[in-house]
Structure formats: structure tokens, C-alpha cells
Image (cartoon, rainbow, N blue to C red):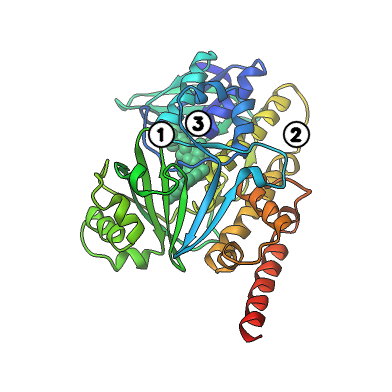
Amino acid sequence: MKSTDVLVIGAGPAGTIAASIIKQAGFNVIIVEKLKFPRFVIGESLLPRCMEALEDARFLDAVKAKNFQEKFGAKFVLDDQICDFNFTDQHTEGWKWTWQVPRAEFDMTLADECVRMGIEVNYEKEVVAIQINDDESSITTIRNVDGSEEQIKARYIVDGSGYGRVIPKLFNLEKPSSLPARQTLFTHFEDVNRATVAQEPNRITIYIYNQQTWIWVIPFSNGNTSVGFVGFPEFFASLEGTPEEKLTYLINSHPELNERFGNAKMQFEPREIHAWSVTTDKFYGDGFVLTGNVTEFLDPVFSSGVTLAAVSAQNAAKLVVKKLQGEAVNWQQEYMDVCMKGVEVFRTFVMAWYDGDLHNIFFSKNQNPAMREQICSVLAGYVWDESNPFVTNHQKQVKALAKFIRETQLENEIG
Ligand SMILES: Cc1cc2nc3c(=O)[nH]c(=O)nc-3n(C[C@H](O)[C@H](O)[C@H](O)COP(=O)(O)OP(=O)(O)OC[C@H]3O[C@@H](n4cnc5c(N)ncnc54)[C@H](O)[C@@H]3O)c2cc1C
């Protein structure tokens, strides 16, 4: 039986970032990944805060060399109104830019870096069972594609299995999400009209289609652009035809998208994903820690997924190192409470997006410059910055600002 200090489940950003940081501290790491890479996964727009985690994991140079599309902010569009955030105008001192990435290539880059660092990355090996021993070490059973099985002994396990949710499923830690189930329909287009039609052709843009439905447009440096509609399942159920016919109908119904993508070739049959919001009872236990999407995934609207995955992996890895070095770790305070602080800020923003408060704030004519910078910091992923009132007091700040804007608008209309 193989033996290692740390077994990492999954070679997504959470798994590879954790693996790299633990390896750099001098411990042996094995990654087991169910699929063959490169593989498709959604989650293509990053936030500046995740650059710190990529830097800590020593991945930045390798990612830079791929020439992915740089991202300097985010643009929200409601009919003819535009709300434009530039990360240079944020309250927090930190990264002012990041990337828009086809994840197959991005994740492969991180995994290749792990191999280069001497980490054993095993593809097409699925974790199917885990037994934790009294001393917190574990025996993990792996199934190969030919059906054969093998076991790996580890001192600690980092679960970065994303939507696979390996440990929550095996150990009954699943918990329903507080957010209602939503759905998406998306593809990548060969964006042949980008240069001629779009005003800022390479910028990520979020279009509001109706109060509960929005669209992402994420251009890549390879000439393709990811386009997806997000809404309630009833919205998609009301459309007829194949996924391709549904997406074509939606694109044609939106003048700006129709002009850009109406005659563009889809790179693959549009895919649907349903009910992605999930969470877990506890992010740690004897001999293991959960990172990335396995902990909690909220909603794609503010592109928070990879950043929360990266930061949780960065934090988890440092605590695993501390533990392996024989120091005590208070997982609740040092890990789960920290993760939840950031998640709760994004939860408030996601809920305020769907209940319309953020639409009021984003498209208000009277913007308070300091508050705009504070909101921009949240959108850049700096959701642990205690000097930002939209972090420390997120719910009250968002509610109060939206109410103030609505009342001022009403007064102006009456006056
Ligand atoms: C519609 C939609 C749009 C999104 N858009 C964005 C966005 O624009 N920006 C953003 O930041 N995030 C976005 N996300 C979120 C993003 O997809 C995730 O947050 C991100 O991929 C999480 O990374 P991870 O490393 O935790 O997991 P993953 O990237 O899912 O990686 C987990 C890996 O574990 C492997 N695995 C699973 N089970 C097993 C097993 N049993 N054994 C071994 N390996 C296993 C999987 O094959 C996979 O490779 C979006 C999500 C959705 C649903």
C-alpha cells in the first residue's frame, strides 16, 4: 500500500493550491483525480483576491505564460444603463486585476506545476471509500477506470473534490443550501464579431435579462467567449426545443447578444447545470479538511467560486502543515469561521442581487464614491478586509444603501 503525508482529492484549483503549499512546507503529497485532464469545468472568471493564493502556491508565472485574457473589472448592464467597476478603484490595497480562463487549460496548468514540483498527480482514479483510524491517519480506497482498486495510507486528507463532494457524501455531512435552486444554459462561441461589434470586446459583462435572469459574457484570449443564461428552472422549462434551440432563441431575443453571437458558431452543444448551491455541516473532522466547492458554493453571479476555493485551500493547507508539525489547530476558529466570514459577505451580495437591492445600488445616478470603492473591493474578492464596512456590516450596509437610494429617487420623482 502506498503511503503519504497528505492525500488530496481532486485536481481543481482547491486541490492543486493546497497540494503545492503543503509540498513547499516539506511534506509528501499525492493528488488523486477522478477524470483525465484537461477536462471541462465551469467557473471561468476569476477575482483579484485569488491571485494571492496562486502566488502563495507559486503558480503565477506558469499561469502568466499562458497569456489568458486579463480582467480589470466587471461591467453590469441593464437595458441602456451601465455600471462599470474597475478594480483599480477599490477600497482595499491588493491585486487590481486577474484573468478570464477556459478552465480546462487553467486547471491543467496548475496540475502540471504540481507535477513539476514533485507532487504525484494521478488521473482517472476515483476515491470511493475512506476509513479514518484512531490516530487520525486514514486508508483511502481508489477505483481505477478498469474497475481495479488500490489503497493509499495518509496522515491527513484534503478534500478538494468540488461538485464530487466526496467526504460530505461518504460521511453524511451534506446540508441543504439557504439559496433557492437555479439553473444555467451555456456554451462557448467562436466570437468572430468581437472586434467589430463590441465596445469593450474583451471585458466580462453581466447583462440583466429580467429581474431573476441574467447573462454572463466572458471573452477568452483564444478568440472564444463563454455565454450563459442563469435563472429559475421555470424560466428554462418555458422554452421549447433542444438546448441549442433554446440558447439560440435566448440569444436572438437580446439585441446586443444577437448582434455579436447571432451568427457565431457554438463550440459545443449548450450544457445545463441545475441546483448548484450546496453546503456542508462541518468543514473539518478527524484527519481531514474540506476545501473549495466542497465547503459551500453559492451562486455564479459575482464569480466568487474559484476565489473562495483558492483562499480556503490556501488557509487549509497552512493549517494542515501546522498540524503535521505537531502544533494544535482550532479548526473551527482558525478555518471554518474564517471561510464563513467571506462566504457570508458574498451570500448577502447574491441575495441582494436577486431581490433587486443591488440593481438599485449599481444603477443609481447618485453614487457615493467611498461606498462604490468599498463595494468594488467585495467584487474583487476582498471579503475579509475588516476596514471595509461592506465586509464587517455587509447586510446592514447593503440594505440601508438600497433603501436610501430608493427613497431619494422617490423624493426626486415627487419633488
Ligand atoms: C453556472 C456556474 C457558473 C460559474 N461561474 C464561475 C465563475 O465565473 N467564476 C468562478 O470563480 N466560479 C464560478 N463557478 C464556480 C466554480 O465552478 C467552482 O467554484 C470551482 O470550480 C471550484 O473549484 P474546486 O477546486 O473546489 O472544484 P473543481 O474545480 O470542481 O475540481 C474538483 C475536482 O475533483 C475531482 N473529483 C470529484 N470527485 C472525485 C473523486 N471521487 N475522486 C477523485 N477526484 C474527484 C473532479 O473531477 C474535479 O476535477 C460557477 C459555477 C456554476 C455552477
Point 20% across, 60% down: residue: 241
Three-letter amino acid code of the residue under disc 2: Val
**Residue tagged 3:** 9
As displayed, is residue 120 above or below residue 207? above
**Residue tagged 1:** 221
Say which element carries label 2.
Answer: loop
Which is more toward the observer, 93 or 130?
93
Query: Mark 1 or 2 closer to N-term?
Result: 1
Three-letter amino acid code of the residue under disc 1: Ser
Q: Is residue 2 left or right of residue 348?
A: left
Image coords of residue 283 (percent x, y): 62, 43
For residue 329, the mark is 2
Which is more toward the observer, 320 or 264?
264
Q: Is residue 287 visible?
A: no
Query: Mark 2 or 3 closer to N-term?
Result: 3
How far apart are labels 3 and 1 at the CA level?
30 Å
As displayed, is residue 91 above or below residue 158? below
Point 74% across, 39% down: residue: 334
Image quadrant in which you'd find residue 359: bottom right
Q: Is residue 81 left or right of residue 36?
A: right
Front tag of 3 and 1: 1
Q: Is residue 90 visible?
A: yes
As displayed, is residue 395 above or below residue 111? below
Say which element carries label 1.
Answer: loop
Three-letter amino acid code of the residue under disc 3: Ile
- Image quadrant in which the C terminus is located: bottom right
How far apart are labels 2 and 3 at the CA level?
21 Å
Label 3 lies in ligand 1 vicinity (Cβ under 8 Å): yes
For residue 18, the mark is none
As displayed, is residue 169 above or below residue 236? above
Say which element carries label 3.
Answer: strand
